[in-house]
Structures are given as C-alpha cells and as structure tokens.
C-alpha cells in the first residue's frame, strides 16, 4: 500500500505540486479584476491579511492531518476521530467536493484547448466576436477534445505522485511563471498601460466595505485550494523530515505572487485596449473575461505588433491559462483516486480507471449544458435565475461548499483532534514551531476566530447565490 500511494521526492516537489493545484483561473483572471474594482492595493492588503491570518493556519492544519495519517480526507478524519461516523461524513464531503469541481474545471479546460487551436490557425479575430463563445460551447465536436483531454490527464495520474503529479508540476509551474513574467513585461511596454497599473496599485480605501472584505477572504480561500481535500491528500505524500509551516508558507507565497503578477498583466492590457475603461463595468467572472473579453484586448494589439504578433501573444496567454488549469485539474482528480486506493484497497491503475469512468459520466452532461442539450442548459433555477447543470455544479461545490469544509477542518483540529495533536505533528521536521508566536496564534485562532469567519462566508454565500 505504501508503494501504491507514493510520496513526493522532496520538499520542492511538494511545494511545486501544491502551488500547481492552487494556481488556477481565479489567480490569473478573477483576482486582478476583483482588486481593481474593490480599491486596488487596498483590496490587495486585505487579501494578504486573510492569507496570513486565516488561510495559512488552515493550510497547515490540512497538511498535518494528511501527513499524520498518510490517508485521504475520508481516512484522515476517520483515523483521527477514532472511527467516528459523523467525522467520516465530513471527509466524504471533502472527497465529493473536488470530484464535482473537477467536472466543471474539465469543461473549462476543454474550451481553452479549442481557443488555443482557433488562435493557432489565425482565428483571433473570429474569437473576438461577441457571439463566438456561445457558438464554441455549443459545438458537438467538444466531445472529441474532452476525450483527448481526459486521456492526457489520466495518463499523467497513472504515473503516480512522483512520476506523474510531481513531474508535471516541475515542468509546468516554472514554465507558467516564466511565461507570465515575459508576457507581463511585454504588456507593460504598451501605450496607456500605466493607467492599468494605477488602478491596480494605488489604494482606494473608499471602496472597502463588508462585501469587499467577504470577497477578499473568499478569493484567498479558494485561491489556495482550501476546503477541497487537496492539501490533506498531498500532506499524506509529504515527508516527515520536512517542515509543514515552511512548506505551506512557500506555497502561499508562490500562489500569491502568481496572482499579483497576473494583475500586472491583465489590468494594463485592458487599459491599453481602452484607456477609458471603467473597471466597475468589468465582470469578475473568470469565464466571461477569458473567453469573451480578453480576445478583444489581444486583437487590439495588432496596431502595435501586427495581427500575427497579436495572435502569438494571445496564444501564449491561453497556453499559460491552460497550464494553470491542467495542473489544478490533475491535483483535484487525485483526491478521489487517493480515496479509492486507501478505502477500497484498489491498485492505482484500477483507481484511475474508476475515476476516469465517473468523471466522464458527469463531464458529458456538463459539456452539454451551454447549448448542446436544452435539458441540461435549463436544468434548474434558483436565486431568481435559470441555471444549467454546469452552473449548478459550479455554484454548489466551487462557490459554496469550500468555506464550509474549511470550517469543519478548523473545528475538527481544535476540538476533536485537539490543538495538542495538531502541534505534535507540526513540530515534526520543524523544532522552531514549538513555543513560537505562530503556535500561540494557531492555538487561539483555529477554534475561535477562523471558523467563525469561514462560517459567516459560507452563510453569506448561500444567501447571495440561492436567495439573491
């Protein structure tokens, strides 16, 4: 069983893999626009505050649960609660959540593949048309791309932790970072780019209100893959010789740095396209920005670099987003695979096959949810709006459940596993943790401030999405 589960070869491998799971569409697109709409650097300061005081402790708790038990979320909750059925249910929720998130993430990644293909054959102008996205997502040919993508993802996962997940992260994460820096450097040379920098980096505290604060915490929590069971599972592959506090800190720094640089890319690009842009009119939807708005920005660059140059820039950007989506997707799908290996005693090959079948069964109707099938396109309604099957999966499992799972982790570690149990794991590989200010803060906040904040976020999200 030890050989089936595998282990990261080094702390660097863990950091890159965990950062790969964290860096996704929210970092590259939603974060920059949320910052610009909500006070620029003022939002960034609040975001960093929540990363340090809320998310960082939850990260350490999740990793510690996994490393202590060398189990998936179901097994971790069960072992640490002496087989409590109630807490085992919490672990099951942390398995179901990433499985369903993988469903809509798979569909988005398929769209990215289609856009990269269209740009590579000279279709940037076609993609810039406002009606193109609705036409692309309703193509029956999407199923061909879906099967190809799933084949690639599950081939990677067959390689296991070290030869699959870690190897992918070691290649794609440095590549993604380099592409982001180079593309940002290019965009900053464009005329009027300075206006975007001003919107992004000059603080405007007048825009800060309770809604902005709630949005900053939600973005920070989602950005670091908390509440998905990813860090519990990755923690189960983490060496006892390495420091959890140090590694978690490096993951948070890497994830936040990517988000920050994305802001230096997206906002200057938007203002280079239209110096009179009103950021209040921009959607914070990652999907809307990536597929409907950004192609227009890249097309506008042809005045400076020509159509071919603009197409190259667009291709680089969409490839960058694809890399981020692929690393996140692989990480998310590994969570249920780990569960099948631990709880059902399956070999990795059989667990991967089982997960491939289940994901395909759900990804097909999600792919049909934006025009291919009227039944799945108009699947239900809530919050005063009609919702597709794709919308339902995204709203329930991506927008709503994550802070609740984070809440259960905090309560579990503070009152069931006990702070002393958490401390005994965190000092392994890091003697400096014992007696530190960080230990004192976590001992106090993990069972008080942090779960209260996460519960408030969960409740406010429920009222906002489902009751308008």
Image: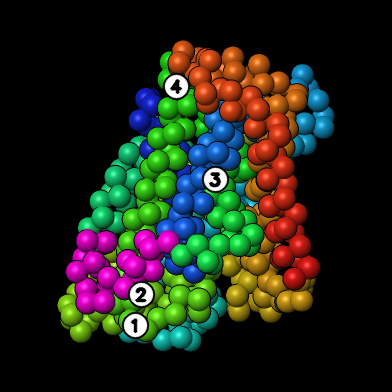
Pointer 2: residues within 10 angstroms few (<14), some, or many (20+)? many
Which class describes the residues within 10 Å of circle 4: few (<14), some (14-19), or many (20+)? many
Residue tagged 3:
50
In the image, taking residue 413 as reference, residue 330 lies left or right, namely left
Residue 270 image label: 2
Gap between marks 4 and 3 measured at Cα:
22 Å
Numbered disc 1: secondary structure: loop
Q: Eyeballing the image, is 360 above or below 374? A: above
The residue located at (77%, 76%) in the rendering is 384
Query: Which residue is at 55% across, 78% downward?
Result: 138
Q: CA distance from mark 1 to mark 2?
A: 6 Å
Give the mark nearest the N terminus, 4 or 3. 3
Residue closer to the observer: 200 or 143? 200
Label 1 or label 4, whichever comes before in sequence order: 4
Q: Nearer the viewer, mark 1 or mark 4?
A: 1
> Would you say 241 lies left or right of 385 here?
left
Between tags 3 and 2, which lies in front? 3
Q: Position of residue 211 (x, y in %)?
A: 63, 62
Q: Kindly identify which residue carries mark 4.
A: 243
State the SS at label 3: helix
Q: Which residues are magenta?
A: 184-203
**Quarter where residue 173 is shown:** top left
Q: Does 57 sit left or right of 452 as displayed?
A: left
The answer to whether residue 187 is magenta is yes
* Residue located 58% across and 28% down the image: 441
Q: Which label's residue is closer to the chain start, 4 or 2? A: 4
């Amino acid at each position: 069983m030890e050989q089936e589960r595998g282990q990261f070869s080094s702390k660097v491998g863990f950091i890159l893999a965990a950062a790969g799971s964290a860096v996704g569409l929210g970092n590259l697109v939603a974060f920059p626009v949320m910052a610009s709409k909500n006070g620029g650097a003022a939002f960034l300061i609040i975001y960093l505050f929540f990363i340090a005081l809320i998310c960082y402790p939850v990260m350490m708790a999740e990793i510690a649960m996994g490393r202590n038990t060398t189990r998936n979320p179901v097994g971790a909750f069960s072992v640490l609660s002496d087989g409590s059925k109630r807490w085992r249910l919490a672990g099951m929720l942390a398995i179901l959540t990433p499985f369903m998130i993988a469903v809509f993430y798979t569909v988005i990644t398929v769209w990215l593949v289609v856009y990269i293909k269209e740009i590579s054959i000279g279709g940037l102008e076609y993609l810039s048309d406002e009606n193109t996205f609705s036409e692309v997502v309703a193509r029956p040919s999407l199923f061909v791309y879906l099967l190809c993508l799933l084949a690639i993802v599950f081939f990677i996962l067959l390689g296991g932790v070290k030869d699959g997940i870690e190897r992918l992260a070691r290649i794609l994460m440095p590549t993604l970072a380099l592409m982001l820096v180079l593309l940002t450097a290019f965009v900053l040379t464009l005329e009027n780019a300075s206006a975007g920098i001003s919107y992004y980096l000059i603080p405007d505290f007048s825009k800060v209100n309770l809604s902005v604060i709630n949005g900053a915490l939600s973005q920070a929590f989602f950005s670091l893959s908390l509440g998905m069971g990813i860090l519990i599972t990755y923690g189960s592959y983490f060496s006892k010789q390495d420091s959890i506090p140090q590694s978690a800190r490096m993951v948070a720094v890497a994830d936040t740095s990517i988000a920050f640089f994305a802001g230096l890319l997206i906002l200057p690009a938007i203002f280079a396209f239209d110096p009179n842009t009103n950021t209040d009119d921009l959607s914070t939807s990652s999907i809307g920005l990536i597929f409907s708005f950004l192609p227009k920005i890249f097309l506008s660059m042809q005045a400076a670099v020509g159509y071919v140059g603009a197409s190259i820039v667009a291709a680089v950007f969409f490839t960058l987003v694809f890399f981020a989506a692929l690393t996140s997707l692989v990480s998310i799908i590994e969570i249920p695979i780990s569960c099948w290996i631990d709880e059902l005693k399956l070999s990795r090959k059989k667990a991967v096959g089982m997960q491939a079948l289940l994901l395909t069964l759900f990804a097909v109707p999600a792919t049909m949810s934006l025009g291919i099938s009227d039944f799945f396109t108009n699947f239900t309604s809530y919050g005063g709006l009609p919702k597709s099957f794709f919308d339902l999966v995204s709203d329930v499992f991506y927008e709503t459940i994550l802070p609740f799972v984070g809440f259960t982790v905090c309560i579990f570690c503070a009152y069931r596993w006990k702070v002393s149990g958490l401390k005994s794991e965190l000092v392994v590989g890091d003697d400096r943790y014992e007696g530190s200010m960080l230990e004192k803060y976590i001992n106090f906040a993990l069972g008080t401030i942090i779960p209260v904040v996460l519960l408030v976020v969960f409740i406010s999200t429920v009222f906002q999405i489902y009751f308008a």
